Amino acid sequence: MNDAVTKPKTRTKTKVERPKLHKVILINDDYTPREFVTMILKAEFRMTEDQAYKVMITAHKLGACVVAVFTRDVAETKATRATDAGRAKGYPLLFTTEPEE
C-alpha cells in the first residue's frame, strides 16, 4: 500500500491595484466666450452639444464644474490640451485636475 500523503496545491494570486482617478475641472472666467468653451468641451472631451452646454453653464453658475474623470495621465493631458487651446486663441480658459476621493 502506498503511504504517500498528497498535499493540495496552493496558488498565490497577486492583486493588482486599480489606478487612482483624477477629475478634470473647468474653472469659470469672465472673458472666454461660452461658444468657445462649448467647442473645446466637444473637441477634447467628446461631448455632445447638449452635454458641453450643460457643463459650461454649470461652471458659469457655480464657478467650476467637473468635466470628466480619468486616470492621472489622461486627465492631465486633456486638461493641458484644453487650456492650451484657449491660450492659443488668447483666452484665459483654465482646466485643472485633482485626485478623486
Image: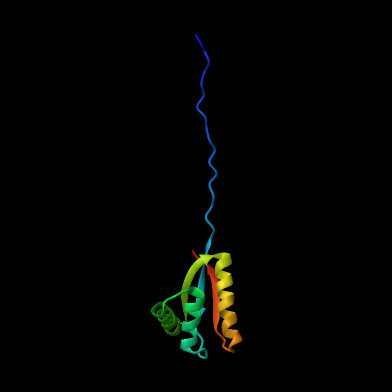
Q: Position of residue 53 (x, y in %)?
A: 41, 82
Scheme of colours in the image: rainbow
Residue 44, position as x, y percentages in the image: 52, 76
Which is more toward the observer, 41 or 19? 41
Residue situated in front as seen by the camera: 24 or 35:
35
Quick check: 13 above or below 39? above
* Residue at x 52% of width, y 55% of height: 18
Q: Is 55 displayed left or right of 31 in the figure?
A: left
Count of numbered tags: 0
85 shown above or below 8: below
Residue 74 position, x and y percent, is: 56, 67
**View extreme (top): residue:** 1
Q: Position of residue 47 (x, y in %)?
A: 44, 75
Q: Residue at x 55, y 44 (%)?
A: 14
On the image, which quarter does residue 98 sit in? bottom right
Residue plotted at (52% across, 12% down): 3
